[in-house]
Image (cartoon, coloured by chain):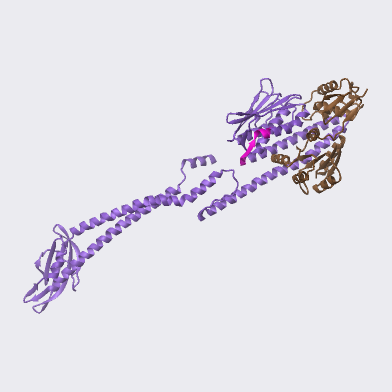
Amino acid sequence: MRFLLIEDNADLARSVCARLSLEGHAADHAVSLADADDHLAAATYDLILLDITLPDGDGRSFLARHRAAQSDTPVIVLTARSAISDRVDTLDLGADDYLTKPFDFAELEARCRAVLRRRGNTLSPQQRYADLIFDPMGANVSVSGETRELRNRELRLLEILLSAPGRILSKDQLCDRLFSYSEPVSDNAIEVYIARLRRKLAGSEARIETVRGLGYRLTGG
Amino acid sequence: MSRRMNRNMNQRRPASLRRRLVVQLIALSAVLALILYVAVRLGAERASEATLDGILGAATIAIAEELRSVEGGAELELSPGTFSMLAAMGEERIFHRLDLGGHAVTGYADLPLPTATPTALTAVFYNAPYRDAELRLAAVGRSLMIDNRPTPVLVIVAQTREGQRAIAQQLANRAAALGLAVFLIAVPLSLLAAGTLLRPIARLAEAVSRRGGHDLRPVHHRAPAELQPLVEQLNAFIARLRTTLTQTETFIAEAAHHIRTPLATLRSEAEIALRQAQDEPTRVQLRSMIRATEESARSANQLLDHATVLFRAEQQAQDKVDLGVMTAALVDRFGPTADLKDMQLALSLPSERLETKGDAVLIEAALRNLLDNALKYSPADSTVDISLIRDGINARLSVQDQGRGLGGETLADLSQRFRRGVNVGQVVGSGLGLTIVAETMAAVQGRFELTDREDGGTCATLWFPLSV
């Protein structure tokens, strides 16, 4: 996916862009509203991440302008303000969603996905691996023509495995990306989800192999 | 100290302007009535006495003038005019005495003499007791040539004043009646005047108290000139308070911004580092760094939210809040968060519209905290049931999870600031979430209950008074 991040804090912007590219997304950074307008004139984006406090104006005025121009690129507001009412405000002004800084990246991704799904956006391409057709937006996987629904964690686990097929991923690596850092995770938690995903992939050439002592890897027969 | 002062103020009734004004006006009317009575009475007495004295004096002078000297003595021949004057004295008793050369020659020789001997033909008046009566006397002196010798003559005419006194008493009674009438008319007039005078004050007081303590708009009530400074000061005070409140709000927002932005960078950087780190000790360190970031972010969040809640609870906004719409929007917003844990949010809404009055921002904060708690403390794959239903004159909103329950603690324990449950384990929290809910429910005059569910989990219930 292609993101436009409108954020005046250089450190945060660089970090968020790095994080987005790490997940395989493309991200452009605009430091001000004027800069954002230039970017939007030059390219199309799947999603806009908008900070509220910007040097040359309020992010909310951008939202109002953006909606008035009938642009249908979804906007997720990243707010650092506390006034609880701010959050309500931005939704009224036509933001698709908002997140309070600092945010969990997994949650940002989940919200992006939810926003795009709500918009009926099918931009995100389906991924093919062996006889699997994985549709992250539709939250399903087809195994030789048979479509199976994926629950969120199964989906994310498959996404992680598909991002590095053949490579061994340790339990810890998987845990870090599957579970929130603020929740307690039991030792066998990852096994539960591996087992579930295996059931969903049953009958496929693609298999999740257990590499004893090291972790798991996806192989395509 | 302040409590004692309050009690003292409560014990002593505040001075009433109205009562003071009425009492003073009535006292003033009483004094005026008394003065009127005295003035009328004295004036009437003086006037009647002056008239009577005039007649008495004229009669005495006439007698003195009608004295003529004859051989070896004096002769008096009263003219008809003098007679009629004496007759005009009415029913009073009349006495006379005539002295020639210092000896009483006719009349009542024991009639008291004036202190100063009158010389010219003008009457000297005086009062004196005589026998059983109080007399008013007029004395006129002249000189008469008797046997070619000037001889002093003294004419004294006296009269009783019983009739006059009776008339004076009658007049006095009338004066008293007049005074009393004036007083009686003055009482209702005083009450009326006090009422009219105090009406602008009463109206201003009513206008100010009707707005309540939370209305921070300036007072635009028409007040009399004397009250204008008071209204101006009140408005200046309101303006100052409003500025302070706005500054507080701005400060909270600014503080949030300055705390959250660097935390967001820190967290994002740590997440990237964790993704790239290979050796286990670094990964452990990074993980605890992320947890710490999360913890401080949450605390900052909740502290600032708590400050906002306290600040807003003070203002008591009266928005119309459609609880169904608000709950649905929030549940929708928490969808992706629940999804991350493969959790279900089951929402049950009534077909009717349930509306309450209060600060929408506060109510939203309360609901958000309950949903946040339910998601945080529940295991993956569980369901949170959210239901809104009418309960008599209230709307009842309950959030039920399949989490770890209350661990034997009560709402009173858990709603204390920074107090976290005994069974929170590793879940990150600030100990302010339930405080915010409890404070919000107090601000909107609602009710908050937190109970363990029979089959495990927690049930949080909010009751909002329905607006009519």
Q: Can you tell which quarter of the image residue B264 is in?
A: top right
Among all residues in the image, which is located at the extreme right? Answer: A221
Spot occupied by residue B431 in the image (x, y as percentages of width and height): 69, 32
Give the tally of numbered discs: 0
Whether residue A157 is visible to the viewer of this picture, yes or no, is yes
Identify the magenta region.
B314-327
Q: Can you tell which quarter of the image residue B287 is in?
A: top right
In magenta stretch: residue B319: yes
Spot occupied by residue B356 in the image (x, y as percentages of width and height): 61, 35
The quadrant of the image that shows the N terminus of chain A is top right
In the displayed structure, would residue A31 be above or below residue B443? below
Q: B331 or B150: which is nearer to us?
A: B331
Spot occupied by residue B390 in the image (x, y as percentages of width and height): 61, 29
Chain letter, brown in picture: A
- A56 lies left or right of B188: right
The quadrant of the image that shows the C terminus of chain A is top right
Among all residues in the image, which is located at the extreme left? Answer: B71
Chain letter, purple in picture: B
Q: A70 or B371: which is nearer to us?
A: A70
Spot occupied by residue A39 in the image (x, y as percentages of width and height): 84, 45
Among all residues in the image, which is located at the extreme bottom? Answer: B148
In the displayed structure, would residue A160 be above or below residue B200? above
Q: A69 or B65: which is nearer to us?
A: A69
Whether residue B115 is visible to the viewer of this picture, yes or no, is no
- The residue sitting at 81% across, 38% down in the picture is B266
- B436 lies left or right of B121: right
- A36 lies left or right of B425: right
In magenta stretch: residue B49: no
- The residue sitting at 31% across, 54% down in the picture is B179
